[in-house]
Amino acid sequence: MADCCTNAACEIDKLRQGQSTTLRAVLGINAAMFVIEAVAGLLAGSTALLADSLDMLGDALVYGFSLYVVARNDAWKAGSALLKGGIMGAFGFFVLGHAGYKLLHPQTPHFETVGLIGLLALAANLFCLVLLWSHRTDDVNMRSVWLCSRNDIIANVSVLVAAVGVWLANSQWPDLLVGLGIAALFLHSSVHVFQDAVRTYKAHDDAQHRITRADHAHE
């Protein structure tokens, strides 16, 4: 009898199981880091850390949505990606609002806290990136997850740059500029994910129309 994994359906099931296991792991890591960074960001008065914590929360939600649709069709996956894009965009505008508040109420962040928590977040996200590497080209769902994780690394390195900048300049401006940069990254990624999701949904819709026409032709 042929091995189960030579069957296409069995290969798909195996892929979905691998995706689900990976998504559960990175979801837990990001949820924990959101709490740590949010508390540290508020205590340290850091826009960059607060922005990065929202990135962690957004990713935890993204992974949760991705886990829900991992066994569903492309229309569901495209819908999940649209929701992820909306979350990224909303967080981007929130950070812009927080930066505006800091301009009106200046506060120099505690660079030691920003640097230490930034290093912890970078280590956590590098581990997530390693876990997600083999799934980065699976489908629109996992591509959007991969994009989120890649952005995390950029954001984490930026937070460390902010910590060094605050230390050298004794000013809130390096932290504020990094926070604004992360917000811009949120907004840019939001547009990219929206475009990818729309392309996938259109392709799925076209395929469904072709199937419907073929069924009618055989009647």
Image: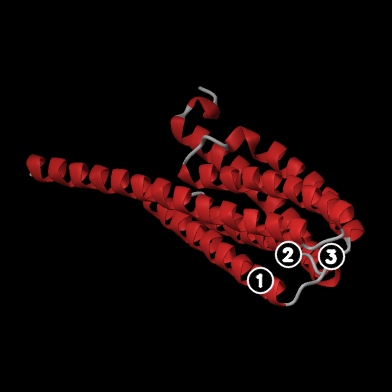
First in sequence: mark 1 or mark 2? 2
Q: Is residue 137 left or right of residue 63?
A: left
- Evaluate if marks 3 and 1 touch, with contact meaning CB atoms under 8 Å apart: no
Residue 82 image position (x, y, % from top left): 44, 57
Which residue, given by chain and number where applicable, does mark 1 sit on? 98
Residue 65 image position (x, y, % from top left): 54, 58
- Number of other residues with Cα within 10 Å of mark 2, as a class: few under 14, some 14 to 19, many 20 or more: many
Q: Residue at x 17, y 47 (%)?
A: 212
**Front residue (pair 97, 127):** 97
User: In the drawing, what numbered circle is on residue 47?
Assistant: 2
Marker count (numbered): 3
Q: CA–CA distance between discs 3 and 1?
A: 14 Å
Q: Residue at x 59, y 64 (%)?
A: 91
- Callout 1, which amino acid? His
Q: Is residue 94 left or right of residue 160?
A: left
| Label 3 secondary element | loop
- Evaluate if marks 1 and 2 touch, with contact meaning CB atoms under 8 Å apart: yes
Residue 8 image position (x, y, % from top left): 45, 31
- Callout 3, which amino acid? Pro
Task: Spot the residue most to the right.
Answer: 112
Q: How is the image coloured?
A: secondary structure
Which residue, given by chain and number where applicable, does mark 3 sit on? 109
